Image (cartoon, rainbow, N blue to C red):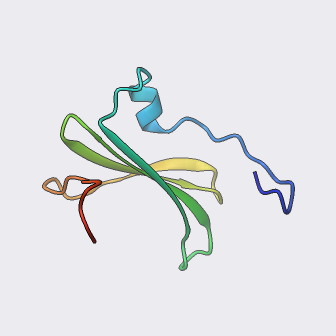
Amino acid sequence: MNPATRWSLTLPLARIQLVHSDNKVEFSLRGFGKDYVTGAYKLVWLHNNNNISSCEVFDFGVKEWRQVISPPDHRIDHNQEA
């Protein structure tokens, strides 16, 4: 919800929510940002499960989640420094 514009949107479930409805995901981190190429606002959801890292991006322009494929040897580590 955007309190300044009173606009709100109920998000569809992300793939990780559909696959793991039991809430057993090792690590999950969400973020919000803007795609400076398209100007679209997006939610980013990083998660690890069974040593497999995944990333999903919700695009407010098209109103859907999409999976972003990360390199197979790159694990998302919440203790990692940039």
Q: Residue at x 22, y 42 (%)?
A: 52
Q: Residue furthest top?
A: 22
Report the side of 65 relative to 72 (left or right).
right
Q: Residue furthest bottom?
A: 37
Report the side of 78 relative to 30 (left or right).
left
Work out whether residue 24 or residue 63 is closer to the camera in this orientation and state it.
24
Q: Residue at x 35, y 26 (%)?
A: 24
Q: Residue at x 24, y 54 (%)?
A: 77
Q: Is residue 62 above or below residue 11?
A: below
**Residue 50: image x %, image y %?**
20, 34
Tally the marks.
Answer: 0
Q: Is residue 36 above or below residue 76?
A: below
**Residue 25: image x %, image y %?**
34, 33
Report the side of 65 relative to 23 (left or right).
right
**Residue 81: image x %, image y %?**
25, 67
Quadrant of residue 49 within the rendered picture: top left
Work out whether residue 28 or residue 7 is closer to the camera in this orientation and state it.
28
**Residue 11: image x %, image y %?**
64, 41
